[in-house]
């Protein structure tokens, strides 16, 4: 990455009193005892940045004290944290902006990290926007790349803008901490090292439920619903406008079923009402990183591309040999998705059933 | 009940093109629209007005041309409109923007107490989703983002019950007014304006305020009030390699599919093993 051009007429020297801020933090996102994988992706990324800077990685785990929460603290070490800030209070059992913001503001002001990272999730984006305001510092949203500019040891946070048509690199030079949210699945999952341990700093914020205005009446878990779980699928078969009409989406579902994968779509299909928003892959939908992404009848608009280009292997099927998707897919097949999809479903079916008979 | 809806005029991102030679954004001829995510919030505010009665003020910060977006909102049924415009706001990042908007909302509250602030989930140009939370935090309002449904609103008890999307499900939350809400996209259908609202919108004398009108401090707005610095803007680089085309022995879909399966298995032997193991286990 090239060095930045310095903006004119602005102060960007770090004031003396902010120089004591040290270390990179990740706020670990847990909901009802399960951690969002973006948190571990970020601990892995923080490890790399911290090694460059020669500082510690801190993982902040908030919630009600429980065996699950202790297990999460242990996991944070195995993924690369040096110190875990374990912040427990019964009021923190469910995520609510107000108590989480108050507690995080205090903890940041007490321990003074130079960088604070969160997942660009519903929780992370909600919390980050509030904390950056209480701390009056800079926040870069929805990043896809993080780096350190070594000349001034500052965080360079790169993010898509204008619907993914441009990327920009943003810095917070004269304020601390430097904050960023990062999209799930763009950083790779770090390998676990079960021999790693570290320090635990316990924080007891002594909150009072009576002071919290927002109450959680109930929680309707997705696993009790029939929604797509695209973000974590290993295999995704996706369809675009090249499928022609809504009935043809069935061909995509058939192939996904044979492969045990999920179905994704482009934005125009959601807008046309072919399927629900939960299946949309792209800038305004989900970012995915499956092992295999089969794009059928998708031209490869930039808005779709930013949501799926990190897939391990992309097979694109399109009648137009000049479609932009062939510029970034790994494998290309020029042909009509309407005939290729059923043929692929058969071919995979045969290939996999042969093995079952043999086994 | 006084509801303020914050909107932003944005270029229609679907129509932005990158100049192939200079790699810069081509804005010429790109229409300006109300940020699409704001419309879901505006619609929800108008529904509250229809249901329980409310005065809806629409607020935007931007250049003088943003007036057209305010008139559009008036034509949909908003009662009043404020354009916050000042060269001193230029270059504001999200922290400075939320500060400037908050100064205007506080001034509106002097005229009639603001009970609810609606913002878009995020904008389609900046995509930060930070201005709504910034406003809520500065106003000391409860913050309700990614709302899929307003279940009930009780003006007497000043209580509101909402459904909020989280990563693993939906939280049903009860809170007190005042609060700041961002609606999730696709949660409602945006109405068509009524004829008399359209006429009213065209003639309406909307308020134009600047930094001094709202009493915003100069050090907290514009570039001076913005902690973040854009150090580089660039076009994503294309992947160095184009796709390897799957070549089949015959030009039939069957032959192409068979060749594609072999190409996938060849490129990802680990994935092939997993698939075969899963198939063997009968999954």
Image (cartoon, helix red, strand yellow):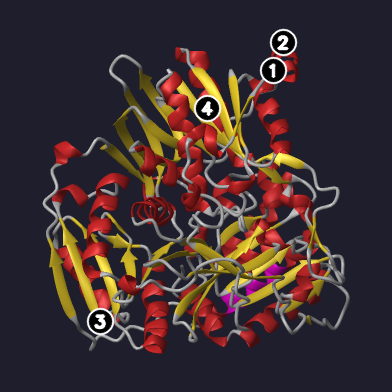
Q: Tag 2: Cα neighbours inside 10 Å, few (<14), some, or many (≥20)?
A: few
Residue B196, numbered label = 2
Q: Chain of mark 1?
A: B
Residue visible at 64% across and 67% down? A167
Please state which of the two labelled residues, at mark 1 or mark 4, is closer to the viewer: 1
Please state which of the two labelled residues, at mark 2 or mark 4, is closer to the viewer: 2
SS label for mark 1: loop
Residue visible at 85% across and 83% down? B249
Residue B179, numbered label = none
Q: Please give left or right for residue A47 compared with residue B235 in the image.
A: left
Q: Earlier in the sequence, mark 1 or mark 2?
A: 2
Q: Is residue A255 visible?
A: no
Q: Which residue is mark 4?
A: B44
To the question of a shared chain for discs 3 and 2, the answer is no
Residue visible at 83% across and 71% down? B22
Find the distance from the CA under tag 3 to the CA under tag 2. 64 Å
Q: Which residue is mark 3?
A: A82
């Amino acid at each position: 990455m090239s060095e930045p051009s310095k903006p004119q007429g602005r102060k960007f020297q770090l004031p003396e009193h902010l120089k004591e801020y040290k270390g990179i933090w990740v706020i670990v996102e847990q909901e009802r005892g399960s951690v969002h994988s973006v948190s571990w992706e970020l601990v892995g990324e923080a490890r790399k940045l911290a090694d460059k800077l020669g500082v510690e990685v801190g993982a902040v785990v908030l919630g009600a004290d429980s065996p699950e929460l202790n297990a999460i603290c242990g996991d944070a070490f195995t993924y690369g944290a040096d110190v875990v800030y374990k912040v427990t209070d019964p009021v923190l059992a469910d995520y609510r902006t107000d108590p989480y913001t108050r507690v995080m503001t205090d903890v940041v002001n007490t321990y003074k990290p130079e960088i604070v990272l969160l997942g660009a999730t519903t929780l992370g984006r909600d919390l980050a926007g509030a904390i950056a305001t209480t701390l009056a510092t800079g926040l870069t949203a929805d990043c896809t790349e993080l780096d350190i500019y070594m000349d001034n040891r500052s965080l360079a946070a790169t993010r898509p803008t204008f619907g993914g048509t441009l990327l920009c690199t943003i810095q917070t030079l004269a304020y601390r901490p430097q904050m960023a949210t990062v999209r799930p699945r763009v950083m790779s999952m770090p390998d676990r090292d079960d021999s790693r341990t570290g320090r635990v700093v316990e924080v007891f914020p002594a909150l009072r439920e009576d002071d919290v205005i927002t109450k959680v009446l109930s929680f309707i878990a997705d696993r009790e619903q029939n929604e797509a779980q695209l973000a974590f699928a290993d295999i995704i078969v996706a369809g675009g406008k090249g499928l022609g009409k809504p009935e043809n989406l069935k061909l995509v579902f058939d192939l996904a079923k044979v492969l045990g994968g999920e179905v994704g779509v482009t934005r125009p299909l959601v807008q046309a009402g072919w399927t629900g928003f939960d299946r949309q892959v792209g800038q305004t939908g989900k970012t995915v990183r499956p092992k295999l992404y089969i794009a059928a009848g998708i031209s490869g608009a930039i808005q779709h591309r930013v949501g799926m280009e990190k897939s391990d292997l992309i097979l694109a099927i399109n009648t137009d040999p000049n479609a932009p998707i062939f510029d970034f897919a790994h494998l290309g097949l020029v042909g009509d998705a309407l005939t290729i999809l059923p043929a692929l479903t058969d071919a995979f079916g045969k290939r996999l059933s042969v093995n079952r008979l043999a086994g | 009940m006084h509801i303020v809806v914050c909107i932003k005029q944005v270029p229609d991102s679907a129509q932005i093109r990158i100049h192939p030679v200079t790699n810069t954004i081509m804005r010429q001829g790109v229409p300006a629209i109300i940020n699409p995510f704001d419309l879901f919030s505006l619609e929800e505010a108008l529904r509250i007005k229809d249901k329980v009665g409310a005065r809806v003020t629409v607020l935007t910060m931007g250049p003088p041309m943003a007036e057209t977006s305010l008139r559009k909102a008036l034509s949909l049924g908003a009662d009043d409109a404020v354009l916050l415009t000042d060269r001193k706001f230029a270059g504001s990042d999200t922290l400075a923007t939320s500060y400037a908007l908050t100064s205007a909302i506080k001034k509106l509250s002097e005229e009639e107490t603001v009970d609810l602030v609606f913002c878009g989930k995020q904008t389609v140009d900046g995509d930060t989703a930070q201005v709504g939370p910034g406003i809520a935090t500065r106003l000391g309002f409860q913050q309700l983002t990614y709302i899929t449904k307003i279940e009930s609103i009780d003006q007497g008890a000043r209580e509101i019950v909402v459904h909020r999307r989280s990563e693993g499900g939906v939280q049903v939350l009860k809170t007190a007014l005042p609060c700041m809400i961002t609606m999730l996209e696709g949660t409602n259908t945006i109405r068509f304006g009524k004829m008399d609202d359209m006429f009213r919108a065209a003639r309406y004398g909307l308020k134009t305020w600047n930094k001094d009108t709202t009493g915003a401090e100069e050090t907290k707005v514009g570039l001076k009030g913005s902690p973040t610095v854009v150090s580089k803007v660039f076009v994503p680089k294309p992947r160095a390699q184009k796709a390897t085309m799957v070549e089949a022995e015959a030009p039939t879909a069957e032959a192409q599919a068979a060749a594609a399966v072999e190409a996938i298995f060849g490129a990802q032997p680990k994935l092939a093993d997993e698939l075969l193991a899963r198939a063997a286990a009968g999954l």
